[in-house]
Image (tube, rainbow, N blue to C red):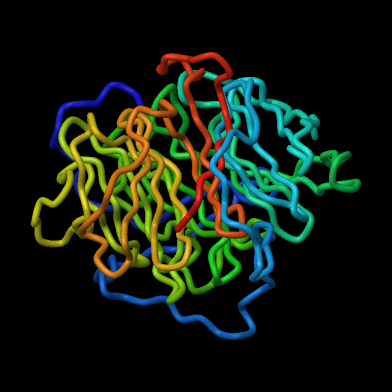
Amino acid sequence: MGPRRKRFRRAVAGIAAATTCLLAAGALAACGSPGPAPSPSRSTPETASSRPTSPTPAPTASATATPVTPGVVAEGLDVPWSLAFHAGTALFSERDSARIRELSPSGSLHDVGVVDGVTPRGEGGLLGIAVRDDFLYAMSTADDGNRVQRFRLDGAPGALSLGPAETLLAGLPAAAVHNGGRIAFGPDGMLYVTAGDAGDPSRAQDLTSLGGKILRITPDGQVPPDNPFPGSPVYSYGHRNPQGLAWSADGTLYASEFGQDTWDELNVITPGADYGWPEAEGIAGVEGFVDPVQQWPTDAASPSGIVIVGDTLFLANLRGERLRRVPLSDPSSSSEEHVGEFGRLRDVVDAGGGAIWILTNNTDGRGDPREGDDRIVRLPAD
């Protein structure tokens, strides 16, 4: 998270009538007129035929699995950013080296490949990853902006390699700060992408820009026909720097977000809704904007990756150096664990068998690296 700008900067007056985006291998595609912004209560229809198969799940364990023992799963990692699973094997991205690495169940590390054309700068580089149907999806920073690509995963676990890159979404605003970067498949089979305002708050309220948004595309990079703004990948807007995505069992989408000087946020995302940045930060009670369900002081949070296991949302915090548990029965409340124990926490994932894995981020230039950093740490989810 970069230096925080002055609060309540003035947004660009009005919302333009068309949205442009770069889709499908970087080719320019025109986007249709968004029309008026729907109310925050608007829902998106879903049909059974539109639900592709689920993304690759985390490993599972039998009902007789032994209790989870906390411990270090891997160490000596170089600015790791995101974790995902493929066929029971963990994959993770490294921001500055642009490497995708594989962690075998035995604990050995293998380089799956390097994503070409990545330009690390500040918070940019190789960011979020997701896996679906033998494809690895990755968001990264290039010379001409942030992009989402996919690569076929070739070979067997333990010796995986990346196939050629296919660019699905390109031209997202990029800067040394506020790149967003999280990608995740929803229960509807669509790929969701967090895009920050890249240091220009006016982008968040401008529907002709893909910055300051949560985006939604199909697995092959098209705009879903039931997106809230016809022809546009924009799913929600008014975001400063959204970081984490997770869905509850009933399909509710939660997103974590870096605020500016006062409040970091946990939001419930409604298609087409406006979350207020830069006119509002935290629970502001401003008509027309959706308030977060929970907020925290920025020096105690900087919420990054999130995951839902059962009826609990887990939230990794960078500056706050702690893991939070948010009960879905009352998402306005939370408890804290491991405060300062592991340093900065970038991501948290469901590792199956009653375990979660957290990814530390102390080697990113803002932390205080300790011996063995960075690490993947296993913790019980109960």
Residue at 44%, 50% in the rendered image: 306
The x and y percentages for residue 338 are: 37, 36
Quadrant of the drawing holding the C terminus:
bottom left
Quadrant of the drawing holding the N terminus:
top left
Residue at 35%, 48% in the rendered image: 256
Residue 132 appears in which quarter of the rendering? bottom right
| Residue at the extreme bottom | 48
The x and y percentages for residue 140 are: 59, 34
The x and y percentages for residue 77 are: 63, 23
| Towards the viewer: 32 or 92 | 92
Above or below 102: residue 48: below
The x and y percentages for residue 275 are: 25, 54
Above or below 197: residue 267: below
| Residue at the extreme right | 155
Residue at 49%, 74% in the rendered image: 226
| Towards the viewer: 71 or 80 | 71
